[in-house]
Amino acid sequence: MTVGRYAPSPSGRMHLGNLCCCLLAWLSAKSKGGRVLLRIEDLDAARCPRRFAGLLEQDLAWLGLSADEGGSRGGAHAPYYQSERSEIYRHFYDILAAKGLLYPCFCSRSQLHAASAPHRSDGQVVYPGTCRGLTAAQIAEKSRQRAPAWRVRVPDEDIAFTDGHLGFARENLARDCGDFYVRRADGVFAYQLAVVVDDALMGVTEVVRGADLLSSTPRQLWLYRTLGLPAPQFYHLPLLLAPDGRRLSKRDGDVSLERLQARYTPQEVVGRLAFVCGLQNTPTPRAPEDLIDGFCWDKVPQTDICLPEGLF
Ligand code: GLU
């Protein structure tokens, strides 16, 4: 059985890009006779107050895209809030530690962004391995100054995969990514570890998400393998851009759900989204169920989608 998922980080109200991702995750799973679960990625609990998760569920229900499992509805894999799953993450973190793959990192943000560190194409820093070889005495000394974050040592290895939508991709972990965080200095487990553990334990078989996370996928595939967990099929979506080419963000009130609900019916929103995603030739209003039969990834553009002026 296909199990898809929504994995939002509700630090604000959903915007059109989030909606688009939910619509395609829902259609991709439903077109295979599957179901969808909702996991709230509120690892950074202070930035993701519960009321936004509640609003998100209301917004999904309004659109006709409610999940079959998870969120406040609960289910067999509860809890579905990452902020309540740290003991589970700790177990897998301990497995990485037992394999000798973890080390403490004392680098500050400004050190990491210093000119010597190479930058990836997505703007992130490739960690130069500054703290990789610290001796026990150095670690003890530095621990007196500040609490460390924890990184996992990656091998000098190419990780290749075939994205269900964007096709073949490959990255060398050591060269293109570097050792990455699995735990922050304040003890919170990092997204890369949590998402892998959760998708595997929740039985997720396909992950539909924005292309901004394509570059995280090799790291995650390596973690699945290292932890002995089954990996899902990935489908990365092109990003939705505002008519002027800007990236949509939760700060853009012009495409927030609040604004859309004041102007349109849910079917009008879904129909317009289906139109920009190539699933129908006109922005005719549609219920999500009407789109299941004709759904096919081949119809969805592979490059960023600029919203036509005046459509929303
Ligand atoms: N929680 C992440 C976000 O909202 C998505 C993570 C994922 O889909 O893997 O950006």
Image: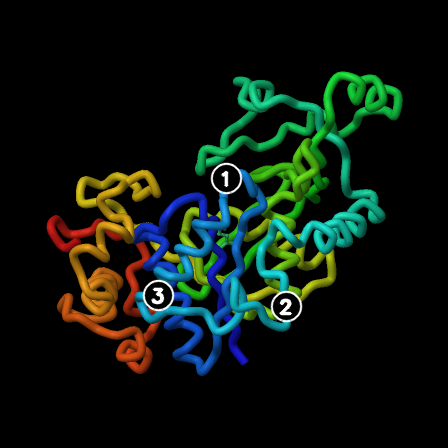
How far apart are the two marked residues, 1 and 2, measured between alpha carbons? 24 Å
Question: Does the closest atom of ligand 1 sit within 8 Å of the Cβ of label 1?
Answer: no
Q: Nearer the viewer, residue 96 or 266?
A: 266
Q: Please give the residue where the numbered disc 2 appears in the rendered image.
A: 77
In the picture, measured across the screen, residue 165 lies left or right of residue 159, that is left
Element at label 2: loop
Q: Please give the residue where the numbered disc 3 appears in the rendered image.
A: 23
How far apart are the two marked residues, 3 and 1, measured between alpha carbons? 25 Å
Badge 3: few (under 14), some or many (20 or more) residues near its Cα, within 10 Å? many
Element at label 1: helix
On the image, which quarter does residue 136 sit in? top right
Q: Position of residue 252 (x, y in %)?
A: 28, 40
Name, please, the residue furthest toward the right: 137
Name, please, the residue furthest toward the front: 51
**Circles 2, 3 touching at the beta carbon (< 8 Å):** no
Q: Nearer the viewer, residue 2 or 228?
A: 2
Residue appearing at x 75%, y 17% in the figure: 145
Q: Report the colour scheme.
A: rainbow
Q: Please give the residue where the numbered disc 1 appears in the rendered image.
A: 47
Which sits earlier in the primary sequence, circle 2 or circle 3? 3
Give amino acid for label 2: His
Give amino acid for label 3: Leu
Q: Position of residue 75 (x, y in %)?
A: 59, 71
